[in-house]
């Protein structure tokens, strides 16, 4: 049984499940996930990925739906007695599911484990009691789990199997129908409605400011599959009425938008690591509710929120948060990347370091072999 609760988990789960099916074509996979996992051969019992929320207070409305999903999965755990429980990120939900699996005598493997190095270290005690083996995506996670007595194996980050290594600027621009000399600013406001509502307006304001500074600049918005195009259209219409520049919206070409852009305005999340792997200079931004902000400040242990900075261990990319997310600030930071090749070059150098720390491609296959090894030992 597999459990993933968000779009990024669905992506990583699909990588793992395809590899599992390749190693054992007769393997039956079922559980919680989204369309990518379904395409990888998983029987989806419940799909929460289309209703993902950002922040703590925003997630409250999801509780009844997730509680029903939890009850369904626990019932199926007890009825079907799967060989193993495979968890992917989504710790508040998945650690509770892990407890039920261990009580039923079912081994638990955690792929993309909770970011204990950035948030709540107290969870490691739960991990030690409930998880049979952790498959670590980052090398620095190894020591943390080893010291807690948790069996851990470094398999690398699954994005290495997803992000195309041969997608360069020229190829990306060709796919987007853009010329090589155009200055391109990419907008990636996130995969959740709340992210788009909070981040796209200042991004569009920044686009207007950047356009006024240089009318030759072009703007393209990468639309996540989980975001309704009509929501984006409302924001674009308002920006256009206020005199903003044309913004082309593309769906299904997120990596091309990243690789083609001279500067990215991007929501914090898994996409920032994808952009780093593609060498895309970026400005990271994020806004949550006041309640979520307070809770985050209480629990947060890392000095950064974006994955490129966390992995690099320093502020390689600018992070604009909360009330500081304004069109003026985003435009100012983007202008640094567009007008100063040194700033963009420094980011790309940092991204090479990040890439070297994430392991080697073939993550899905290594993780799948580790899962089957646990199953064989159960």
Image (spheres, rainbow, N blue to C red):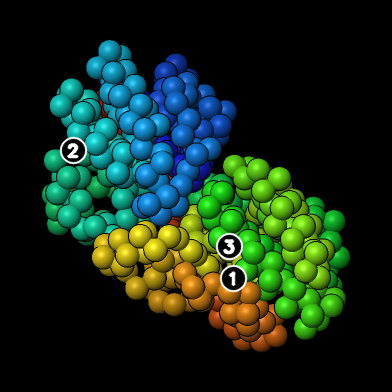
CB of mark 3 within 8 Å of CB of mark 1? no
> Does residue 161 appear to the left or right of 55 in the view shown?
right
Specify the farthest residue to the top: 79
**Callout 3 secondary element:** helix
Q: As displayed, is residue 100 above or below residue 146?
A: above
Q: Can residue 256 be seen in this view?
A: no
What is the crowding at mark 3: few (fewer than 14 residues within 10 Å), some, or many (at least 20)?
many
> Front-most of 293 and 45?
293
**In percent of the image, x 15 and y 27: which residue is there?**
103
Q: As displayed, is residue 247 above or below residue 183?
A: above
User: Pointer 2: what residue?
Assistant: 130
**In percent of the image, x 41 and y 39: which residue is there?**
62
Quarter holding residue 372: top left
N-terminal label among 3 and 1: 3
Picture coordinates of residue 337, whole percent (x, y): 64, 80
> Front-most of 341 and 206?
206
> Does residue 310 appear to the left or right of 344 in the view shown?
left
Give the foreground label among 3 and 2. Answer: 3
Picture coordinates of residue 165, whole percent (x, y): 61, 55
> Does residue 122 appear to the left or right of 287 in the view shown?
left
What is the crowding at mark 1: few (fewer than 14 residues within 10 Å), some, or many (at least 20)?
many
Q: Residue 173 carries which label?
A: none
User: Pointer 1: what residue?
Assistant: 282
Q: As displayed, is residue 87 above or below residue 285?
A: above
**In percent of the image, x 20 and y 58: which residue is there?**
121
Quarter holding residue 128: top left
Quadrant of the frame with the C terminus? top left
User: Pointer 3: what residue?
Assistant: 199
């Amino acid at each position: 049984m597999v459990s993933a609760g968000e779009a990024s988990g669905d992506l990583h789960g699909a990588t793992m499940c395809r590899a599992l099916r390749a190693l054992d074509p007769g393997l039956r996979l079922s559980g919680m996930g989204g369309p990518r996992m379904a395409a990888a051969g998983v029987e989806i019992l419940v799909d929460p990925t289309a209703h993902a929320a950002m922040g703590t207070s925003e997630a409250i409305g999801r509780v009844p739906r997730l509680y029903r999903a939890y009850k369904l999965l626990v019932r199926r755990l007890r009825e079907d007695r799967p060989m193993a429980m495979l968890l992917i990120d989504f710790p508040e939900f998945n650690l509770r599911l892990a407890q039920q699996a261990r009580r039923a005598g079912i081994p638990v493997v955690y792929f993309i484990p909770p970011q204990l190095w950035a948030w709540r270290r107290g969870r490691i005690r739960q991990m030690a009691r409930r998880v049979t083996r952790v498959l670590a995506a980052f090398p620095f996670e190894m020591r943390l789990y080893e010291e807690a007595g948790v069996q851990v194996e470094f398999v690398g980050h699954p994005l290495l199997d997803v992000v195309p290594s041969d997608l360069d600027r020229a190829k990306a621009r060709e796919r987007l129908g853009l010329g090589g000399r155009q200055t391109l600013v990419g907008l990636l406001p996130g995969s959740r409605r709340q992210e788009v509502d909070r981040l796209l307006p200042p991004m569009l304001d920044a686009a207007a400011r950047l356009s006024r500074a240089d009318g030759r600049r072009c703007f393209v918005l990468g639309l996540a599959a989980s975001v309704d195009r009509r929501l984006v259209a409302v924001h674009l219409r308002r920006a256009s009425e206020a005199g903003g520049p044309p913004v082309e919206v593309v769906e299904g070409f997120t990596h091309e938008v990243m690789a083609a852009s001279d500067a990215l305005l991007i929501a914090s999340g898994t996409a920032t690591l994808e952009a780093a792997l593609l060498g895309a200079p970026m400005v990271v931004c994020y806004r949550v509710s006041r309640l979520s902000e307070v809770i985050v400040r209480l629990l947060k242990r890392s000095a950064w929120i974006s994955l490129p900075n966390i992995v690099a261990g320093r502020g390689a990319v600018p992070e604009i948060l909360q009330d500081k997310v304004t069109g003026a600030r985003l435009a100012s930071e983007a202008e640094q990347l567009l007008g100063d090749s040194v700033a963009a070059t420094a980011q790309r150098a940092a991204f090479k370091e990040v890439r070297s720390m994430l392991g080697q491609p073939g993550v899905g296959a290594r993780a799948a072999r580790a899962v089957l090894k646990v199953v064989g030992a159960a």
